[in-house]
Image (cartoon, rainbow, N blue to C red):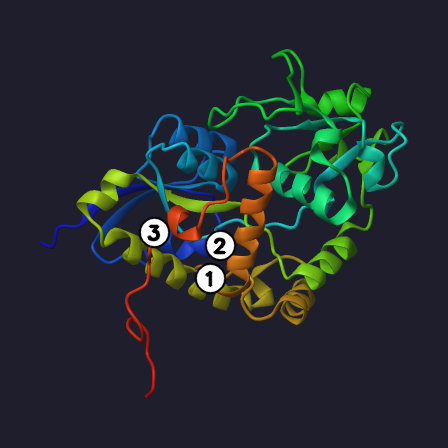
Amino acid sequence: MVKKLELTLACGDYEIVRPLKEGIVSPDGIELTIVTKMDSTTRHWRFLRNGEFDVAEVSLSSYMAAKTRGLPFEAIPVFLHRRFRHGFIFTNTASGIREPKDLIGKKVGVKAYLVTASLWLRGILESEYGVPHKSIEWYSELDEDVDFKLPEGLTLHKISNDKSIEQMLVDGEIDALLHPDLIDPITDRDPRVGRLFPDYKSEEIAYYKRTGIFPIMHVLGIRPEIIERHPWVAVNLYQAFNESKRIAMKRMEDPRIVPLAWYREAWEEQQEIMGGDPWAYGLDGQNRKTLETVIGYAHQQGLIDREVELSELFLDVSQGRKRGDKHRV
């Protein structure tokens, strides 16, 4: 019997990892125990704080903060979660906020300051709409995945355990909220809460056409002792995740598998706007620009003390020029 390296993998329960979860794809030489039944913030904490998993989908911003502080983590450029974020700026409808610059001088909540969604939104608001992140009084709900020193000139309050950042928005204790997920007042259609960008999809499409950026939220973290003992793991995992995504995307082309009336039209719209594979892994093309942009935001906002190179953040998953793929000479 061939012995395989046994590793635990914690990640979201995504279609693009279904082939891995179901055993249709298996990393060469690796036996994965895959755990998916936890929310993102819990998974990030359990990996970065507790070291509970060998491999884990983890917040990009928290990983950068950990890596630049010398904490023992590595990552490969597998991006299981991306999302445009303009639709996740929520406002109290009595706050008088009608456009981005109305956020200046206001009280704005975040789930946690290091959350990647909030990092992207603060960066986009500052670079695209002229809203300096230090012009806002910030309120956060959760402890950070990684300890960091509050940058000079930044006002950040931690709310008490008996408060909810969403309820504070509803009650008008804060004026706006940047959140990684849809919040209950929006799904419940509470009239006291709205979106900064009501037509957020159009805003996101315009942003993509202007910048070519499809924001990366998460990377695939690996405990460094795994790589030290088994350097081949990084490449083999990368290959397996790419194959899993390829199979999943092929399956997703079939509109019969999704109970949405205009699913196929949405698929074709994505292709028309964003091309064949906007979910690509690796450090080539637009991924490089996207990552360099968010590194710049992280430095600007004090999450990291310098603009790191991509080679510092990600393990090399190449196999040499013209190796590992079919090619014609």
Q: Quadrant of residue 260?
A: bottom right
Residue at (53%, 52%) from the top-left corner? 292
Q: Nearer the viewer, residue 298 or 49?
A: 298
Q: Which sits earlier in the primary sequence, circle 3 or circle 1?
A: 1
Which amino acid type corresponds to the residue marked 1 in the rendered image? Ala
Q: Tell me the element at label 2.
A: helix
Q: Mark 2: give few (<14), some (14-19) or many (20+) Cα within 10 Å.
A: some
Mark 2 and mark 1 in contact? Answer it, CB < 8 Å.
Answer: yes
Quadrant where the C terminus is found in the figure: bottom left
Residue at (71%, 47%) from the top-left corner? 127
Report the side of 159 relative to 319 (left or right). Answer: right
Q: CA distance from mark 3 to mark 1?
A: 25 Å
Quadrant where the N terminus is found in the figure: bottom left
Q: Nearer the viewer, mark 3 or mark 2?
A: 3
Mark 3 and mark 2 in contact? Answer it, CB < 8 Å.
Answer: no
> Which residue is the extreme one toward the left?
1
Residue 153 to residue 217: above or below: above
Image coordinates of residue 155 in percent, x first then y, are: 68, 22
State whether residue 168 appears in this view: yes
Q: Which sits earlier in the primary sequence, circle 2 or circle 1?
A: 2
State whether residue 261 appears in this view: no
Q: Which sits earlier in the primary sequence, circle 3 or circle 2?
A: 2
Q: How many marks?
A: 3
Image coordinates of residue 149 in percent, x first then y, are: 52, 23
Report the side of 292 relative to 85 (left or right). Answer: left
Residue at (43%, 65%) from the top-left corner? 247
Which mark, by number, is residue 248?
1
Q: Quadrant of residue 211?
A: bottom right
Q: CA distance from mark 3 to mark 2?
A: 25 Å
Residue position for label 3 = 315
Residue position for label 2 = 15
